[in-house]
Image: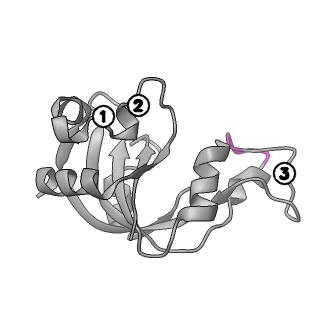
Amino acid sequence: MQTWLMKSEPDEASIDDLERAGRLPWTGVRNYQARNFMRDEFRLGDRVLFYHSSCPEPGIAGLAYVASAPYPDPTQFDANSPYFDSKSTPTNPRWLLVDVHFDRKTALLPLQALKEHPGLATLRILKRGNRLSITPVTDAEWQVLEGLLA
């Protein structure tokens, strides 16, 4: 099982939204590297650290898991969607998504706490210039995070 940190803006999809729905499609990924993680490396049951971004206090807000194989993101075909891609077609979609399933909410583990923990110095989200919405988390990083999220 792998662990992934997946960022979402809480006004679009929060951990509370996921808890209410139980399962949500992870729409709107428009970065090829993040898409490739979903397409090539995600496996059913992989652990997801649900991270709230672009908000007053960003941080890990809960846990989920990958609940589907990748499939075409329907927002790429919707001209009214902010995620519309005119170069993508149903026969040749550019963008994929996976469904994520709620596991549990946690006390918010703020970005600042992640930065201050020496065991998380290699966490990809903390690297200068990182803008990816999906990043892998190593087993060693997960072990540290698991203790902090308990």
Q: Residue at x 13, y 50 (%)?
A: 148
Placement of 147 over or under 70, stated as above or below: above
Percent across and percent down for residue 5 are: 39, 50
The residue carrying mark 1 is 58
Q: CA distance from mark 3 to mark 2?
A: 27 Å
The residue carrying mark 3 is 88
Percent across and percent down for residue 134 are: 49, 48
**Which element is circle 2 on?**
loop
> Is residue 43 shown left or right of residue 75?
left
The residue carrying mark 2 is 54
Percent across and percent down for residue 71 are: 67, 68
**Which element is circle 3 on?**
loop
Which class describes the residues within 10 Å of circle 2: few (<14), some (14-19), or many (20+)? few
Q: Mark 2 or mark 3, which is nearer the start of the sequence?
A: 2
Q: Which residues are magenta?
A: 79-83
Marker count (numbered): 3
Amino acid carrying label 1: it is Pro
**Which element is circle 1 on?**
loop
> Which quadrant of the figure has residue 56?
top left
